[in-house]
Image (spheres, rainbow, N blue to C red):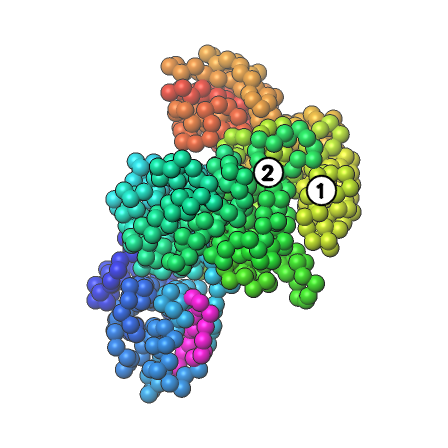
């Protein structure tokens, strides 16, 4: 059936809902519904009959104490969700309960009604209590919140407990968020594009204005509220100054209206040079009284339209953005002039700590981008106003596959701070690869930076919450890039990262396994094989991605000056954006020690720094982040660094291939639409992992001159280079960088015609898998066909919308055709017809014994 419950509505009629549930004809638990992924983890799929039996005593009436927008939303969500989960009509009431009821209200409204019940006397902001009680013989489930938003969070928590099949017969559960700040940042542009957007265009903007239809924004607010998110910044930190003009503010107000029912505060990113760009001033000097007056005027205007605005976000003096350095002012000066305009409205400014001078001379070995955040902000500790939050990326570089925790977290004692985590997989497969980020985030959040001498320790999660040094604001900011794709993020499994961010922001001690398991159950159902398979793929995905991309803390080894996607080993060195790994003919790694390197290690507290200063005490997984070592350096595993590089890249590619095998076992257990969509993504990832494997290993084999002890690197049995095939209208082309194509070359086909490449098979007869390695450019479309003998085997279109217009590691793609019968003398032919300016480029074919 088609899932037609795809939009959140403000009210639900119990009668209409009941008719809807039964009219949909809920099938047996083994039937898989057709789904798009739009409902994500809020599917509320009807529970199997045996599970529904556990909730026979759950009241079918929902009573809400109060009549506010957020409380009505909480009531309607329970009516909607419980009715679907239990396949039962649910009624809504607005008076004190006289029948068995689910009672919703704030503590101050619930306590007088429920005298004698063991309700907490107080809760932290946004916290809630779930309880069960019997009053005057009536069975009650109570959802009591510290505030109205807490009631909404409690309603979602109750529904998710039931959706997970948990016992709710004797509820007595108190939950409070770890920190007051749980925000999402979007990098959406007013023209509808998204910086680092991999799932369609903006859900907020198009053609320089807010979209007319904000249904999707309302539904997005519902998803975020369900995991405790309380703020959303909707525009790019590389901000367009027009966003705070009088003509645009009413449009922002419409977005705020769409998010308000879900308890989510709107915020916007601003351009620090706005006083000059849009204010008619000749300056944006933060110490100029006219500039202060400009910010007060703009902030007051926004709050007149949006009284519950959360605040503003500012990126300044970084990557070409103008900032206080233009007037020899400090970041504190810049933050405070805006903070003082916000303070009367209880607004907050998030000042991004991602500040570095990309114009530095990176040939100077002591210059180190990793030092930048600490060097810019440590000396300013205590000079920021109370409503300034310093937003610090989790690592000192830029969302790499593995980084140590930023030392700035442990260095600020008098400044509010929030950790910035990137839900967007910018350097991590861009949602074409599954890469579950919660384990990576946990690695950083759990690190003890030993910022005090007291016990227990000071893990990053406690530092950013504000509880270590009693700073009033702090918490978590996640960079998200949901778009107009039906499943929000382009890859159904990528939604686990959005869900996981919310779960960690609320409670960062939750295990990655628990989050993966809960998300899988909510998103794909209760079948044990489905749960085990998807959870294992998620938990294995980040280690696998790290293995086939960047080893031992060297970074992702991607094209750092391009789209940050495919391999490009040398691009992260000798450019204007820093340096990553310093690989040369004898060794690899950044020397960041005090004794001989950049001195970055000294930014950590003494005990932490001592561990990183020595090679022997630095964990292998971060060795190359802190030390430059010979390729022959022996790791704790007993392997040399170079052999570790070879081995892990083969291991990671094999693990990516295993995801396909595991997923295929779910064919009849997951709805056909999502099964096919995820399978296509995993098959692509398995092929692209081979691109990574070969590019990295070939490059290091070349630069080090040290062979792979197992003899794999540089040797490819069954591979037939396109340039060695019999070519018709194809011509050979050098690929840049060379390591991203097999043998450094491809064959390209001029637009306006068709080309063919032929190979005469001379091996033994049997069943074989044939891989066609080609380049799917984004500047047109190419139609590929595989023909064996006179028999067409497969036809497909290369029509990528992002990546690159050239053959390289971004566009390298593999098409696998399985179990094809071949006999000696059979001709294998690849035909291509390109359109646009696409080159229809072919890299190689590879013939291997047929797999399953």
Q: Label for residue 206? A: none
* Residue located at (60% from left, 63% from top): 468
Looking at the image, which is closer to me, 550 or 685?
A: 550
The reply to whether the C-beta atoms of the residues labelled 1 and 2 are less than 8 Å apart is: no
Looking at the image, which is closer to me, 716 or 229?
A: 229
Task: Say few, some or many: other residues with alpha carbon within 10 Å of mark 1 (under 14 / 14 to 19 / 20 or more).
Answer: some
Q: Determine whether, in the image, residue 236 is placed left or right of residue 766.
A: left
> In this rendering, does residue 178 appear at all?
yes
The mark nearer the N terminus, 1 or 2, is 2
Place of residue 334 in the rendered image (x, y in percent of width and height, measured from the top left): 49, 46
Q: Which residue is mark 2?
A: 556
Q: Name the element at disc 1.
A: loop
- Alpha carbon separation for disc pair 1 and 2: 23 Å
* Residue located at (54% from left, 39% from top): 328
Q: Which residues are magenta?
A: 119-134
Q: Choose mark 1 or mark 2, whichever is in front.
A: 1
Tally the marks. 2
Q: Name the element at disc 2.
A: loop
Task: Say few, some or many: other residues with alpha carbon within 10 Å of mark 2 (under 14 / 14 to 19 / 20 or more).
Answer: many
* Residue located at (50% from left, 13% from top): 731
Place of residue 678 in the rendered image (x, y in percent of width and height, measured from the top left): 44, 44
Q: Which residue is mark 1?
A: 599
Q: Is residue 289 magenta?
A: no
Q: Is residue 130 magenta?
A: yes
> In this rendering, does residue 675 appear at all?
no
């Amino acid at each position: 059936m088609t899932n037609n419950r795809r939009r959140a509505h403000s009210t639900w009629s119990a009668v209409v809902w009941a008719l809807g549930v039964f009219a949909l004809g809920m099938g047996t638990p083994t039937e898989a519904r057709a789904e798009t992924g739009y409902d994500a983890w809020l599917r509320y799929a009807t529970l199997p009959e045996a599970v529904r039996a556990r909730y026979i005593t759950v009241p079918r009436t929902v009573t809400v104490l109060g009549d506010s927008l957020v409380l009505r939303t909480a009531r309607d969500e329970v009516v909607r969700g419980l009715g679907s989960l239990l396949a039962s009509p649910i009624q809504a009431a607005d008076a004190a309960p006289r029948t068995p009821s689910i009672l919703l209200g704030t503590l101050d409204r619930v306590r007088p009604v429920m005298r004698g019940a063991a309700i907490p006397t107080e809760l932290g902001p946004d916290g809630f209590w779930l309880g069960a009680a019997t009053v005057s013989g009536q069975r009650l489930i109570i959802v009591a919140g510290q505030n109205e938003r807490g009631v909404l969070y409690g309603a979602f928590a109750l529904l998710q407990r039931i959706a997970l099949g948990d016992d709710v017969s004797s509820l007595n559960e108190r939950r409070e968020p770890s920190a007051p700040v749980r925000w999402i940042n979007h990098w959406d542009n007013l023209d509808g594009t998204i910086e680092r957007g991999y799932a369609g265009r903006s859900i907020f903007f198009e053609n320089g204005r807010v979209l007319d239809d904000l249904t999707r924004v309302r539904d997005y607010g519902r998803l975020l509220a369900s995991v405790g998110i309380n703020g959303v910044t909707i525009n790019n930190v590389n901000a367009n100054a027009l966003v705070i003009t009088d003509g645009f503010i009413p449009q922002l107000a419409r977005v705020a209206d769409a998010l308000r029912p879900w308890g989510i505060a709107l915020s916007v990113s601003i351009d620090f040079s706005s006083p000059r760009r849009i204010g008619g001033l000749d300056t944006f000097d933060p110490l100029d009284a006219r500039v202060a007056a400009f910010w007060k005027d703009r902030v007051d205007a926004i709050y007149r339209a949006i009284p519950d605005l959360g605040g503003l976000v500012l990126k300044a003096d970084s990557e070409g953005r103008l900032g206080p350095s233009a007037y020899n002012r400090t970041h504190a000066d810049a933050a405070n002039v805006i903070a003082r305009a916000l303070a009367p409205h209880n607004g907050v400014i998030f000042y991004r700590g991602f500040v570095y001078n990309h114009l530095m001379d990176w040939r100077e070995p002591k210059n180190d981008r990793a030092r930048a955040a600490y060097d810019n902000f440590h000396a300013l500790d205590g000079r920021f106003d109370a409503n300034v939050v310093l937003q610090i990326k989790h690592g000192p570089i830029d969302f790499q596959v593995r980084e140590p925790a930023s030392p700035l977290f442990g260095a600020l004692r008098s400044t509010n701070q929030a950790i910035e985590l990137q839900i967007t997989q910018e350097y991590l497969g861009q949602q074409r690869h599954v890469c579950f980020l919660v384990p990576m985030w946990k690695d950083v959040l759990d690190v003890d930076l030993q910022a005090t001498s007291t016990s227990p320790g000071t893990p990053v999660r406690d530092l950013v919450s504000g509880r270590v040094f009693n700073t009033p604001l702090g918490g978590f900011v996640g960079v998200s890039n949901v778009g107009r794709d039906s499943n929000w993020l382009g890859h159904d499994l990528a939604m686990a990262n959005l869900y996981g961010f919310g779960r960690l922001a609320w409670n960062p001690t939750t295990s990655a396994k628990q989050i993966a398991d809960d998300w899988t159950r909510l998103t794909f159902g209760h079948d044990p094989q489905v749960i085990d398979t998807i959870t294992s793929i998620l938990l294995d995905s980040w280690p696998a991605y790290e293995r086939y991309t960047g080893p031992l803390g060297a970074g992702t080894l991607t094209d750092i000056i391009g789209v940050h996607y495919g391999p490009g080993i040398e691009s992260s060195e000798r450019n204007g954006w820093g340096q990553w790994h310093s690989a040369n003919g004898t060794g690899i790694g950044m020397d960041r020690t005090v004794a001989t390197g950049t001195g970055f290690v000294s930014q950590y507290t003494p005990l932490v720094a001592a561990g990183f200063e020595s090679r022997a005490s630095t964990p292998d997984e971060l060795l190359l982040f802190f030390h430059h070592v010979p390729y022959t350096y022996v790791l704790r595993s007993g392997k040399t660094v170079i052999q570790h590089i070879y081995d892990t890249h083969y291991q990671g590619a094999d693990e990516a291939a295993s995801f396909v095998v595991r997923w295929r076992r779910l064919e009849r257990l997951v709805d056909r639409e999502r099964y096919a969509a995820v399978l296509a993504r995993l098959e692509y990832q398995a092929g692209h992992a081979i691109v990574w494997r070969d590019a990295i290993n070939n490059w290091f084999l070349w630069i080090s001159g040290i062979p792979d002890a197992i003899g794999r690197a540089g040797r490819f049995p069954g591979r037939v280079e396109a340039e060695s095939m019999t070519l018709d209208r194809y011509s050979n082309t050098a690929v840049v960088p060379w390591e991203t194509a097999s043998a450094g070359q491809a064959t390209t086909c001029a637009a306006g015609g068709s080309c063919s490449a032929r190979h005469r098979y001379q091996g033994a007869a049997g069943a074989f898998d044939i891989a066609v390695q080609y380049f799917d450019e984004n500047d047109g479309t190419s139609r590929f066909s595989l023909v064996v003998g006179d028999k067409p085997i497969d036809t497909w279109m290369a029509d990528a919308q992002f990546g690159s217009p050239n053959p390289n590691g971004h566009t390298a793609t593999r098409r696998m055709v399985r179990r094809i019968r071949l006999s000696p003398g059979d001709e294998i032919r690849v035909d291509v017809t390109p359109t646009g300016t696409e080159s229809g480029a072919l890299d190689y074919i590879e013939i291997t014994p047929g797999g399953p």
